[in-house]
Amino acid sequence: MEITIDAMQDKYWQSIRAIYSEGIRTGNATFETKVPKKEAWNKDHLEECRLVAKRGDKIVAWAALSPVSGRCIYAGVAEVSIYVCAKFRGKGIGKQLLQALIEDSELSGIWTLQAGIFPENKASISIHESLGFRIVGLREKIGRLDGIWRDVILMERRSKVVGIS
């Protein structure tokens, strides 16, 4: 399957929103229960390191980074968000997109990426592990989704090229 990775553009918002909504509906992708407005989403994510995967002209996945803290000491640490359209899952697109996000993050000076993943989302855990993320630990009952306490596996990847001195 021919996939191209491109920088996210404002004109892609409706596709991004639709893919995010699909992820929310799985109940195993995020604590969010509805897609935020575009302005709120933009505010919560770094301006750089926003990517989409396209099959032809169709957006089939997106990835972006969020800062983990406003403190300057954590400027090189970001949290990964990656979502793949339901009918394109299991085809290697998530891995290809995450690899591109890692490369883009390193070009932007990010030295550590982290991801919080529900334990039930085994495909996402596997993709992250295959690209050098390690499990740091289990955050037990870190939040409630639909009234049920949920655990989150915390994963991180330390760059081998940024901040190594």
Image (spheres, helix red, strand yellow):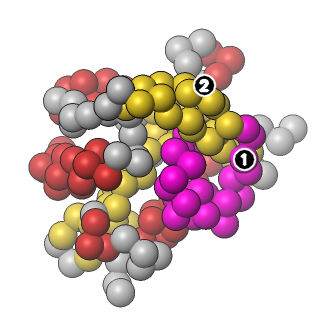
Residue, disc 1 = 135
Amino acid carrying mark 2 in the image: Ala
The picture quadrant where one finds residue 155 is top right
Q: Which residue is mark 2?
A: 75
Q: Residue at horizontal 42%, vertical 75%?
A: 90
1 or 2: mark nearer the eye: 1
141, above or below 106, in the image: above
Tell me the quarter of the image containing the C terminus: top right
Quadrant of the image for the N terminus?
A: bottom left
Instruction: Please identify the residue farthest to the bottom as the structure is shown.
Output: 1
Q: Which residues are magenta?
A: 113-137
- CA gap between label 1 and label 2 equals 22 Å
Q: Residue furthest front?
A: 148
148 to the left or right of 78:
left
Q: Is residue 4 visible?
A: no
Taking depth in this image into account, of 37 and 2 the one nearest to the observer is: 37
Does 135 appear in magenta?
Answer: yes
Q: Mark 2 Cα within 10 Å, few/some/many (few <14, many 20+)?
A: some
Give amino acid for label 1: Ile
Q: Which disc number belongs to residue 91? A: none
How far across and how far down the image is residue 83, in percent? 36, 54
Query: Vertically, is 15 above or below 93?
Result: above
- Say which label, 1 or 2, has the lower sequence index: 2
Give the x, y percent position of residue 63. 40, 51
- Farthest right residue in view: 165
* Label 2 element class: loop
Residue 135, position as x, y percentages in the image: 72, 47
Q: Is 3 drawn above or below residue 143 in the view shown? A: below
> 46 left or right of 124?
left
* Residue at left offset 52%, top offset 45%: 118
Mark 1 lies on a secondary structure that is strand
Q: Is residue 134 visible?
A: yes
